[in-house]
Amino acid sequence: MPIRTSDAQWDGTLKDGKGRFWTGSGEVAGDFSFGTRFEEEHGTNPEELIGAALASCFSMALAADLEQTGHPSTTVRTTARVDLEKDGAGFTVKRIDLEVEVSVPDIDDDVFQGIASTTRDMCPISRAIAVPIGLEARRAA
């Protein structure tokens, strides 16, 4: 399997500096700052990127797991909510909650919930993250 890379650079002091990140593929890049991370300034931040990575991984893995159990989906849409909180002298990601809506016909809800929970626990990005990852899974009407 290939090794994936991402890079980031920070220039300046914490509050007045600025950062830029980019992926090895060149497909994703952006700017970040103190204001985009700890305040309400428009722009991205590392927590948003963790959320995007987890939502992407989970969506793909859930589609695969549903298909492998004989219940192929047509759409899996996942939102990740990353909770960054002040913790003593620093900050900590305390929790990530996933909310997923899946178009998948003819599946018992208990079976669906079990597959979604297993996927949450086994997705490679989930396994790389050491905080609790909540999950709200529902089937689209």
Image: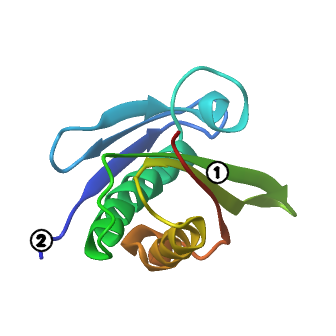
**Quarter location, residue 15:** top right
What residue is shown with label 2?
2
SS state under label 2? loop
SS state under label 1? strand
Could you say where residue 27 lies in the image, as x and y percent from the top left?
20, 38
**Amino acid type assigned to the residue bearing label 2 in the image:** Pro
Residue at the (63%, 34%) spot, across then down: 34
What residue is shown with label 1?
82
Residue at the (64%, 51%) spot, across then down: 82
The first of marks 1 and 2 along the sequence is 2
Q: Residues within 10 Å of mark 2 (few under 14, many from 20)?
A: few
Mark number for residue 51? none
In the picture provided, is 8 more to the left or to the right than 5?
Answer: right
Task: Give the residue furthest to the left.
Answer: 2
Between 137 and 55, the one lying in front of the other is 137
Could you say where residue 18 lies in the image, as x and y percent from the top left?
50, 31
**Amino acid type assigned to the residue bearing label 1 in the image:** Val
